[in-house]
Amino acid sequence: MKVSIDLDKCAGHARCFATSPELFEIDDGGYALNAEISVPEEDEAVARDAVAACPERAIETH
Ligand code: SF4
């Protein structure tokens, strides 16, 4: 699975990082840094949690 983040939609809530600090990197302002993340099989459930946690709906899995 891959996660895409629309960095233009990201508003710096850092909720993705709070859901999984292993998958998501953020800058000092709380904005996501990576537009494309490869998700290991064991982290797929937490990746879906991050999709649900993003208030801007900026994260998609595919
Ligand atoms: S939760 Fe959404 S808005 Fe917040 S930092 Fe992550 S991608 Fe950006």
Image (cartoon, rainbow, N blue to C red):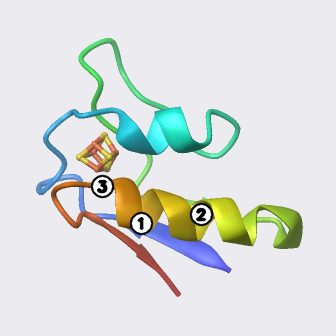
Residue 52 on image: x %, y %:
38, 66
Q: Quick check: can you spot residue 33?
A: no
The residue that appears at 32% across and 12% down in the rendered structure is: 28
Circle 1 packing at 10 Å, graded few (<14), some (14-19), many (20+), is many
Kindly report the distance in space between the C-alpha atoms of the residues bearing marks 2 and 3: 11 Å
- Amino acid under label 1? Val
Residue that mark 2 sits on: 47
Hey, which quadrant is residue 6 in on the image? bottom left
Query: CB at mark 3 closer than 8 A to ligand 1?
Result: yes
x 12%, y 54%: residue: 8
Q: Alpha-carbon distance for marks 1 and 3?
A: 6 Å
Could you say which is closer to the camera, residue 27 or residue 15? 15
For disc 2, the neighbor class at 10 Å (few under 14, some 14 to 19, many from 20) is many
Relative to 43, say whether 25 is above or below.
above
Q: CA distance from mark 1 to mark 2?
A: 6 Å
Mark 1 in CB contact with mark 2 (< 8 angstroms): yes
Q: Residue at x 21, y 33 (%)?
A: 12
Q: Specify whether 45 is left or right of 15.
A: right
Q: Which residue is mark 3?
A: 54
Furthest residue in direction top, as rendered: 28
How far across and how far down the image is residue 57, in percent? 22, 67
Q: Is residue 22 left or right of residue 12?
A: right
Disc number placed over residue 26 in the picture, else none: none
Pointer 1 with pointer 3, Cβ within 8 A: yes
The answer to whether the residue labelled 2 contacts the one labelled 3, judged by CB atoms less than 8 Å apart, is no
Kind of residue at badge 2: Ala
Quarter of the image with the N terminus is: bottom right
**Mark 2: secondary structure:** helix
What's the amino acid at mark 3?
Cys
Residue 51 bears which disc, if any?
1
Local secondary structure at mark 3:
loop
